[in-house]
Image (cartoon, grey):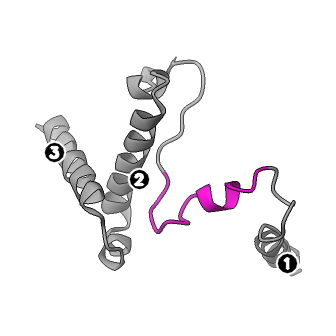
Amino acid sequence: GGELPALVLLDAVSRTLPGVLGHEGSATEDSFVDGLLDHPHYTRPDVFDGEAVPEVLLSGNHKKIATWREKQALGKTWQKRPDLLEKKELSKQQALLLDEYKKELNNLKS
C-alpha cells in the first residue's frame, strides 16, 4: 500500500493548479510557506476550558490581528524550531516582534 504517499503527492501537485483551491491566495497563506510555523488558531466560544481568545483577535482591527499572528508565528518558531530562524533573514519589524514575544514570555514566567 502506497495509497497514502500517493494521496500526499496528489494533494501537493494539485494545489499548484489554477482553480483547484477555492481561493487563489490559500496556498501562499498556508502554514510554513514563509519559513515559519503557523500562529495559534481559535474558535468559538470566546472562552473554552478556561482559555480565552486574545482580545486583539476579537477587535476587528485587521492590521493588529496580522501583527499579532506574525509575532505568534515568530515566537512559536523560535520556541519549537529555532533552526528555521537561523536560515531566515528577519526584517527589522520581525526582529522587533520576536524580541517583544520573548519579553512577554519572560514576564509570564516571572
Q: Please name the residue shown 38% across and 60% down the image.
A: 77
Q: Kindly check if marks 2 and 1 are in contact, taking CB atoms under 8 A apart as contact.
A: no
Disc 2 marks which residue? 73
Give the numbered dot on residue 54: none
Query: Disc 3 and disc 1: Cα gap in Å?
Result: 44 Å
Residue type, mark 1 in image? Ala
Residue 8 picture location, percent across and down: 78, 72
Three-letter amino acid code of the residue under disc 2: Ala
| Residue 77 in the image: above or below residue 2 | above
Q: Label 3: few (<14), some or many (≥20) within 10 Å?
A: few
Question: 104 or 58: which is nearer to us?
Answer: 58
Is-magenta flag for residue 32?
Answer: yes
Q: What element carries label 3?
A: helix
Quarter the N terminus occupies: bottom right
Helix or strand or loop: what does disc 1 sit on? helix
Seen in the picture, residue 81 relative to 53 is either above or below; the reply is: below
Figure quadrant of the C terminus: top left
Using the image as rendered, state which of residue 90 and residue 47 is in the foreground: 90
Residue annotated with mark 3: 103
Badge 2: residue crowd in 10 Å (few <14, some 14–19, many ≥20): many
What residue would you read off at disc 1?
Answer: 6
Question: Looking at the image, which residue sits at the far left?
Answer: 110
In primary-sequence order, the first of circles 3 and 2 is 2
Whether residue 58 appears in this view of the structure is yes
- The three-letter amino acid code for the residue at tag 3 is Lys
Tell me the magenta residue range: 23-38
Measured in 3D between alpha carbons, the distance from the residue under mark 3 to the one under mark 2, in whole angstroms, is: 15 Å
Instruction: Report x, y in % for residue 25.
Output: 68, 55
Q: How crowded is mark 1: few (under 14 residues within 10 Å), some or many (20 or more)?
A: few
Residue 30 visible in this rendered orientation of the protein: no
At x 54%, y 33%, the residue is: 42
